[in-house]
C-alpha cells in the first residue's frame, strides 16, 4: 500500500507522518476520486482518539497523505511486546477506541478495517485509530470487476464491513485478542477464517468472567444484537449501564451460505490481500504502516538506503516541500475549520407523577430510565417510575418496600438495579432491594451490615458493588463512616471489606480505568475534607492517594475518556465552589483546571458522547440555578451552553442511548416533578 515517513515542516517545525502511496494508484482517476472523497470525510473527524488527516494530494505521480504524527507503537506491536492484558487494562483501551469510533460515526464515517495495526498508542498511553477513510479508499484494489473484499479477515464482521455495528464487531475481536493474546478465529485461508466468523461461536470461556458479557455482545453474529452505534457502548464500558439482554438469536450460516463482500474463491481473496514487502526499519529507512513507530527518516536528507528503496528516496528528494505545502495549506485554511457541536439546548419532556429531590435515576438495558424514591417536598417516597425516551413520558412501576432518599441505585451486570440504604424520614437504612425490569417490581435482598445514607455505590469490574462511607447529619446516632462493604449479586449478600482511612459522607466514588475506585472529599466529624483514597478490588483494601487542592462535599466526579477524573464544585467549610481539578491515576495527583463560570453544589455532571462534560443546575449559594456549562478536556476550560427551563438542585441527569441527557426533579418547587432533555 505504501510507506510512512516521519517528516518535519521546514517553516513551523511541526512533525507529521507522511504516507506515500504506490505510484500505480495515481494512474486510476476513478480510484483517486474515490480516495479523495473518502479522505474528505475522514478529515471531518474531530477526536482525541483518531489520528487526524492534515491533508492529501498527488505530487509527481505519487499520492500522499499528511497525518498527525503519533510517537508510539501500534497496538499490535504493543500486544506482541506486552503479552495479554488484564480486563481493566483492556476495558480502558476499548473505551478510548469506542470514543474514537463514536466521533467518527457522528461525522458519518465508518472505518471498515478496525484492527490492532490500525491503532497507535501515544506516549501518554492514549489509543488513536488511524486509516479512517483509507479503509474504503486504499483497500479497494484497481481490479474491481471481480468481487472485492474490504477489511482484514481476522477482524471482519460476518455481514462484511457494512456499518457502525460492523466496526463494533471488529472492536470485540480486538478485545478478545488483548485478553487472550490471539484472535478467536483462524484458518489456512482467508475464506476459512471468514466462514468461522459466520458459523462458529467464539470461545468466551477463555476470557475473564467479567469481560464475557461485553465481548460476547460485540461479537454477536447478528448485527441487531450489537449496539447500533458506538456512543451506546460507552455507558456500558464506563460501568454506568448494563449489557443489554440479547434481543435476537445469533444468526448461523451454513457452510455454503454466501457472505456479503467475499470474493468467490480463496485464491482471489489471497491475491487481493497480499501486502507489499515491508522495508527494513533501519535508521533512515521508511517506516512500514504496521511498524512500532520508532523508525526515523528525514524528508530533506534521507540516509543512504538499500538498493530496493533507492527509487523512493529519489522521489522524496524531488518532493522535499510536500510537508511544507500541506502544513502551510492548513494554516491558510485549506482544511475545514474545527467542527462545533453547537451551543446545546434544553427542551421540556413529560413530567414525573411525583415531585422528587435526592432521588436516583438509572439507565436500564432497554433504554428506559428508572426513577426511584427521593423526597416529595420533605417526605421520602417509596414510589418509582419509568421514563421512555421514545415517547417522552413517565409511567409508574412497582414501588420500593421502604421509603428512601439520599440512597443509591446501581445497575448490575444482569440488568437488575440494586437500591441500598438511604433516609426513610426518621433514620438511615441498612436494607436493600432489587428492581427487575422484566417484572417491573422490587424485591428484598440482603441487608448491609451498617445503616447508611449519603454513601456511595460503585459497580466493580467483577460484577460486585462497593458500598462505602455515608452517614446522616440529621441523626445524632449515625455519624460519618469509614467502613465499606461489598454486595455480591450471585449470593444476594453484603460482606465487609477494608475500611477507609477517613470518614466520607457526601463524597464521590469513581471507577477508574484500571479497576480501582477513587474516593474523594466529603464530610468528616470535623468538617469538609480534601483527602482522597483508592480502593483496590484485588486486595480489598484502601490506600491513600494525593489530596485535592480544595475542600469539597456535595461535589461531582466524572471519569473522562482519557482516564483522568474531573472533580468540580461542591461546598467547602464556608462557601460554594466554582473551582475544578483533575485527578491523574498514573501519578496519583490532583492538579487545577479551568473553573466554572458559576459556583455549584448539588448539581449534576454528565459525560457526553463527544467526551465533554455537562454541568447543569445546582445551588449557587443564593438558590437553584438554571444555567449549565460544558467542560472540554482538550482545552481544560468550561464554556456556557443552553440554560434549563427550570431552576434545579438535587436533581438527576442521565445520558440516554441517543446521546441526549434526561434532567429530572429538583429540590425547589415548582420544578420538583418536571423534566427536560438536553441535546448536545
Image (cartoon, rainbow, N blue to C red):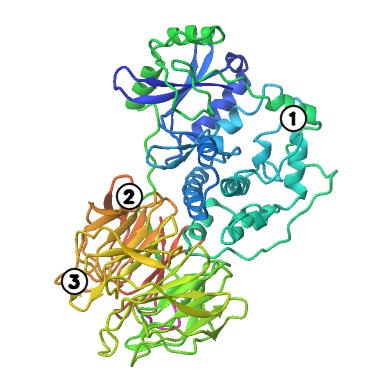
- Quarter the N terminus occupies: top right
Q: Which residues are magenta?
A: 352-356
Residue farthest along the right direction in this orientation: 256
Q: Of callouts 3 and 1, which one flags the residue occurring earlier in the amino acid sequence?
A: 1
- In this rendering, position of residue 54 left or right of residue 413: left
| Distance Cα–Cα, label 1 vs label 2 | 45 Å
Q: Secondary structure at mark 3?
A: loop
Residue farthest along the bottom direction in this orientation: 426
Reading the image, the residue beneath label 1 is 269
**Percent from the top left, x then y, of residue 33?**
57, 24
Q: Secondary structure at mark 2?
A: strand
Q: Residue placed at 32% from the left, 50% from the top?
A: 632
- In this rendering, position of residue 269 left or right of residue 168: right
For this rendering, which residue is in front, 222 or 467?
467
Is 61 a magenta residue?
no
For this rendering, which residue is in front, 231 or 33?
231
Q: Of callouts 3 and 2, which one flags the residue occurring earlier in the amino acid sequence?
A: 3
Is 353 a magenta residue?
yes
Q: Is residue 119 visible?
A: yes
- Crowd tier of the residue under label 1, counting other residues whose Cα lies within 10 Å: few below 14, some 14–19, many 20 or above: many
**Mark whose residue sits in front, 3 or 1:** 1
Q: Of callouts 1 and 2, which one flags the residue occurring earlier in the amino acid sequence?
A: 1
Residue farthest along the front direction in this orientation: 539
Q: Residue placed at 46% from the left, 28% from the top?
A: 293
Reading the image, the residue beneath label 3 is 621
**Percent from the top left, x then y, of residue 348?**
41, 68
Reading the image, the residue beneath label 2 is 632
Q: Is residue 144 visible?
A: no
| Distance Cα–Cα, label 3 vs label 1 | 67 Å
Asked if labels 2 and 3 touch by Cβ distance under 8 angstroms, the answer is: no
- Crowd tier of the residue under label 3, counting other residues whose Cα lies within 10 Å: few below 14, some 14–19, many 20 or above: some
Q: Residue placed at 48% from the left, 18% from the top?
A: 282
Amino acid at each position: 500500500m505504501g510507506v510512512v515517513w516521519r517528516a518535519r515542516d521546514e517553516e513551523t517545525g511541526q512533525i507529521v507522518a507522511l504516507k506515500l502511496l504506490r505510484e500505480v494508484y495515481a494512474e486510476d482517476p476513478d480510484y483517486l476520486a474515490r480516495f479523495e472523497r473518502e479522505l474528505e470525510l475522514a478529515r471531518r473527524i474531530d477526536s482525541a482518539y483518531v489520528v487526524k488527516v492534515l491533508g492529501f494530494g498527488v505530487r509527481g505521480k505519487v499520492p500522499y497523505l499528511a497525518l498527525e504524527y503519533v510517537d508510539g507503537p501500534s497496538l499490535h506491536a504493543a500486544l506482541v511486546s506486552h503479552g495479554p492484558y488484564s480486563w481493566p487494562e483492556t476495558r480502558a483501551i476499548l473505551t478510548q477506541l469506542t470514543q474514537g469510533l463514536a466521533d467518527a460515526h457522528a461525522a458519518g464515517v465508518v472505518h471498515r478495517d478496525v484492527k490492532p495495526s490500525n491503532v497507535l498508542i501515544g506516549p501518554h498511553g492514549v489509543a488513536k485509530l488511524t486509516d479512517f477513510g483509507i479503509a474504503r479508499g486504499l483497500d479497494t484494489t484497481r481490479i474491481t470487476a471481480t468481487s472485492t473484499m474490504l477489511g482484514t479477515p481476522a477482524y471482519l464482521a460476518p455481514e462484511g464491513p457494512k456499518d457502525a455495528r460492523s466496526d463494533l464487531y471488529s472492536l470485540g475481536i480486538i478485545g478478545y485478542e488483548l485478553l487472550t493474546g490471539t484472535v478467536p478465529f483462524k484458518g489456512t485461508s482467508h475464506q476459512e477464517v471468514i466462514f468461522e466468523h459466520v458459523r462458529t461461536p467464539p470461545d468466551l470461556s477463555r476470557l475473564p468472567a467479567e469481560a464475557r458479557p461485553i465481548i460476547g455482545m460485540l461479537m454477536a453474529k447478528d448485527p441487531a444484537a450489537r449496539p447500533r452505534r458506538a456512543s451506546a457502548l460507552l455507558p456500558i464500558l464506563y460501568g454506568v449501564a448494563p449489557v443489554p439482554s440479547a434481543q435476537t438469536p445469533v444468526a448461523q450460516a451454513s457452510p455454503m451460505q454466501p457472505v456479503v463482500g467475499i470474493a468467490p474463491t480463496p485464491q482471489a481473496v489471497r491475491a487481493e490481500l497480499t501486502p507489499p514487502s515491508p522495508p527494513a526499519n533501519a535508521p533512515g529507512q521508511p517506516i512500514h504502516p504496521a511498524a512500532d513507530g520508532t523508525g526515523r527518516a528525514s524528508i530533506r536528507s534521507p540516509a543512504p538506503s538499500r538498493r530496493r528503496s533507492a527509487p523512493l528516496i529519489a522521489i522524496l528528494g524531488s518532493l522535499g516541500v510536500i510537508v511544507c505545502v500541506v502544513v502551510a495549506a492548513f494554516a491558510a485554511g485549506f482544511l475545514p475549520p474545527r467542527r462545533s457541536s453547537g451551543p446545546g439546548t434544553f427542551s421540556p419532556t413529560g413530567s414525573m407523577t411525583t415531585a422528587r429531590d435526592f432521588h436516583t435515576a438509572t439507565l436500564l438495558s432497554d433504554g428506559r430510565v428508572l426513577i426511584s424514591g427521593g423526597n416529595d417536598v420533605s417526605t421520602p417516597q417509596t414510589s418509582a417510575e419509568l421514563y421512555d425516551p421514545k415517547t417522552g413520558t413517565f409511567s409508574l412501576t412497582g414501588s420500593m418496600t421502604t421509603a428512601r432518599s439520599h440512597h443509591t441505585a446501581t445497575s448490575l451486570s444482569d440488568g437488575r438495579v440494586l437500591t441500598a440504604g438511604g433516609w426513610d424520614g426518621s433514620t438511615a437504612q441498612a436494607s436493600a432491594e432489587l428492581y427487575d425490569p422484566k417484572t417491573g417490581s422490587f424485591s428484598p435482598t440482603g441487608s448491609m451490615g451498617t445503616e447508611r445514607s449519603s454513601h456511595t455505590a460503585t459497580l466493580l469490574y467483577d460484577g460486585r458493588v462497593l458500598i462505602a462511607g455515608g452517614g446522616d447529619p440529621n441523626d445524632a446516632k449515625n455519624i460519618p463512616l469509614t467502613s465499606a462493604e461489598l454486595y455480591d449479586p450471585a449470593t444476594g449478600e453484603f460482606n465487609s471489606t477494608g475500611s477507609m482511612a477517613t470518614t466520607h459522607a457526601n463524597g464521590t466514588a469513581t471507577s477508574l480505568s484500571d479497576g480501582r475506585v477513587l474516593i474523594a472529599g466529603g464530610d468528616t466529624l470535623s468538617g469538609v475534607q480534601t483527602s482522597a483514597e483508592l480502593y483496590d478490588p484485588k486486595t480489598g483494601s484502601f490506600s491513600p492517594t494525593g489530596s485535592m487542592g480544595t475542600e469539597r462535599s456535595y461535589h461531582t466526579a466524572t471519569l473522562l475518556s482519557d482516564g483522568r477524573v474531573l472533580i468540580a464544585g461542591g461546598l467547602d467549610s464556608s462557601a460554594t465552589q466554582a473551582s475544578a481539578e483533575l485527578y491523574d491515576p498514573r501519578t496519583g495527583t490532583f492538579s487545577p483546571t479551568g473553573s466554572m463560570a458559576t459556583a455549584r453544589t448539588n448539581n449534576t455532571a454528565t459525560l457526553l458522547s463527544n467526551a465533554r462534560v455537562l454541568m447543569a443546575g445546582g445551588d449557587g449559594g443564593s438558590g437553584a440555578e438554571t444555567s449549565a456549562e460544558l467542560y472540554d478536556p482538550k482545552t481544560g476550560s468550561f464554556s456556557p451552553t443552553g440554560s434549563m427551563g427550570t431552576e434545579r438542585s438535587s436533581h438527576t441527569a442521565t445520558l440516554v442511548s441517543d446521546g441526549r441527557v434526561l434532567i429530572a426533579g429538583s429540590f425547589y418547587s415548582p420544578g420538583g416533578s418536571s423534566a427536560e432533555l438536553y441535546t448536545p
